[in-house]
Amino acid sequence: MKAIIQRKLGKPDVLEYQELDTPQPQSNEVLIRVSAASVNHYDILSRRGDIPHITLPRIVGMDCSGYIEQYKGDRSDLTIGLPVVVLGTSLGNGNSGGYATHVCVTQVELLVLRYKLPKL
C-alpha cells in the first residue's frame, strides 16, 4: 500500500510518501480501502509537535472514508464493499492513520454511509 509517514516533528516537508505492507485485520477489525481523507486541525498540530506524546514514526490522518475490503467481526451491518467513514479516536493517534490506501480500524469506529463514495 501507499502511505504518508511522519518520522519527525516539523513543517509539511517532514511527511514522506512510501510503499508499505498492507495491514491485515485482527479480530473485530475492518480493512478499509481509503477513498478520501481529511486534513484537520489535529493532523496539523500533531505534525508540528503542538500535541504532546505523539509516537513516531506513524501514518498520519485522523479521518477517512472508503470501502470495506475485509472484515473479522460480529457486526451484521458491515459487509465487504460497503462504504464507510471512520470517525475514531485512535486513527492517526497511536494507530495507523487515514493517509494511506488501506487502514485497519476497530468495528466500533465505523459509520456506514448510505451513498457511494467516488472511486479513485
Image (spheres, rainbow, N blue to C red):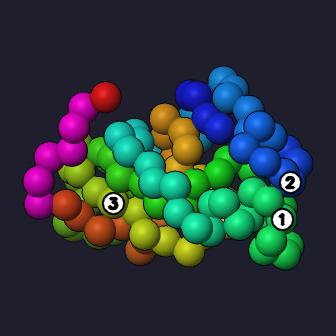
In this orientation, which residue lies closer to the viewer: 117 or 51?
Answer: 51
Mark seen at residue 9: 2
Residue 85 lies in quadrant: bottom left
The amino acid type of the residue labelled 2 equals Leu
Q: Is residue 107 magenta?
A: no
Q: Which residues are magenta?
A: 114-119
> How far separated are the C-alphas under marks 1 and 2?
6 Å
Residue under the point 53% across and 50% down: 98
Residue placed under numbered mark 1 in the picture: 49
Residue 43 lies in quadrant: bottom right
Residue under the point 65% across and 38% down: 4
Give the farthest residue toward the top: 19
The amino acid type of the residue labelled 3 equals Val
In the visual, does 99 lie left or right of 113?
right
In this orientation, which residue lies closer to the viewer: 67 or 107?
Answer: 67
> How far separated are the C-alphas under marks 3 and 1?
27 Å
Q: Which element carries disc 1, helix, strand or loop?
A: loop
In this orientation, which residue lies closer to the viewer: 39 or 94?
Answer: 39
Q: Is residue 117 magenta?
A: yes
